Amino acid sequence: MDERIQQQLNFILEADKLKNVIRRNYLIDDSRRENVAEHSWHSILLAQVFFEYAENKEELDLLHIVKLITIHDLVEIYAGDTFIFDEDGYMDKFERENDAAKKIFGLLPPDQGKEMYDLWLEFEQETTPNAIYACAIDKIMPVMLNTYSKGTSWREASISKENVYRTLKIIEKGPKKVFSLLHEFVKVASEKGNLSS
Amino acid sequence: MDERIQQQLNFILEADKLKNVIRRNYLIDDSRRENVAEHSWHSILLAQVFFEYAENKEELDLLHIVKLITIHDLVEIYAGDTFIFDEDGYMDKFERENDAAKKIFGLLPPDQGKEMYDLWLEFEQETTPNAIYACAIDKIMPVMLNTYSKGTSWREASISKENVYRTLKIIEKGPKKVFSLLHEFVKVASEKGNLSS
């Protein structure tokens, strides 16, 4: 096996660990918390299903968006999942995840590692049209799950409507239709008592 | 909420169940069996990392490949996962999965449901260049996990080198480099005793 493919193999094997990084939110059937790998897949699926709602398709590249979503959470293998409503955890999130990004993407051949690191950074900075779309999709996903499940992770942390809107501002920059769905979810979740008043 | 987005939402919520469909193979750390959603994510990642090895890139579309991999296993929500070495289970696999495909993709608006059904069928038929690449990647993934873990699912079923080659013929049609990796995996797995002789 040549060095290049050995490096790629090491990366793929290490990526397996993302299946054991656990997020706060539960599956819809409330049977267990979700892991980051399966969340990534679900977001990739949603990005495809909702792509028709992007108003700025001429600025977007769906393959690039999928790449952003596929790799952006890999840093959590070392940095762990930071609950989105954990303001303290967010203080040093970038630093922790930047170190983790260098470590995980550093397993790859340098050219490929740089490409993935750049994708990770683009997602984190939330400024390019592709990153804004990817991020809006990735952020609405757990809202959907918390709305249509018992919302256990929100109930556990007494999350309010205000927490959701303040923390998930990026969704407002995504497709209007997706943002209107956020209103719908908040309404349903409030009525069910998944969000505290 | 208009009918179209309600249908899309129903589909995405139903797709959550893929996280509870369990495959035979284990994670690399042998801690538990893998679920289908996280496997799909891992294959999407591998499809990107190994794309450079495709000899026929002018015939391939990586976004289309990612779409094929993202949705092809959704039928297992109703049809269950069929162990690749289960020859009896494979007898009626197409029929069971075709019914499941109509059901799951039937949740979507008709135009989008048809697009996904067609993607599913394309993957299953393994004849287009995109489907061959997607399928080779999807099939080498569990070989990699069984090689670099304790190979519990292979050991449980006494899988041999011959089983692997006979059952995974599609990998030979994919990139040469990926097929050469299959030889390497079989060699390593045999030496470790993960494959029976």
Image: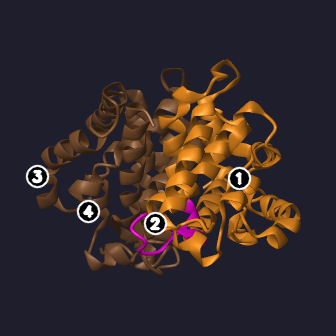
Chain colours: A orange, B brown
Q: Label 3 amino acid?
A: Met
Residue mark closest to the camera, 4 vs 1 = 1
Q: Residue B91 carries which label?
A: 3
- Mark 4 to mark 3: distance in Å? 12 Å
Range drawn in magenta: A20-37
Q: In which quarter of the image is residue A130?
A: top right
Location of residue A121 in the rendering, given as x and y in whole percent from the top left corner? 81, 47
Between residues A21 and B123, which one lies in front from this camera angle?
Answer: A21
Q: Are marks 1 and 2 in contact (CB under 8 Å)?
A: no
Q: Which residue is drawn at 71% across and 22% down?
A: A59
Location of residue B68 in the rendering, given as x and y in whole percent from the top left corner? 41, 38
Between residues B115 and B8, which one lies in front from this camera angle?
Answer: B8
Quadrant occupied by the C terminus of chain A: bottom right
The residue carrying mark 4 is B83
Q: Which residue is drawn at 67% across and 36% down?
A: A174
Q: How crowded is mark 2: few (under 14 residues within 10 Å), some or many (20 or more)?
A: many
Q: Which residue is drawn at 30% across and 75% down?
A: B196
Label 1 vs 2, first from the N-terminus = 2
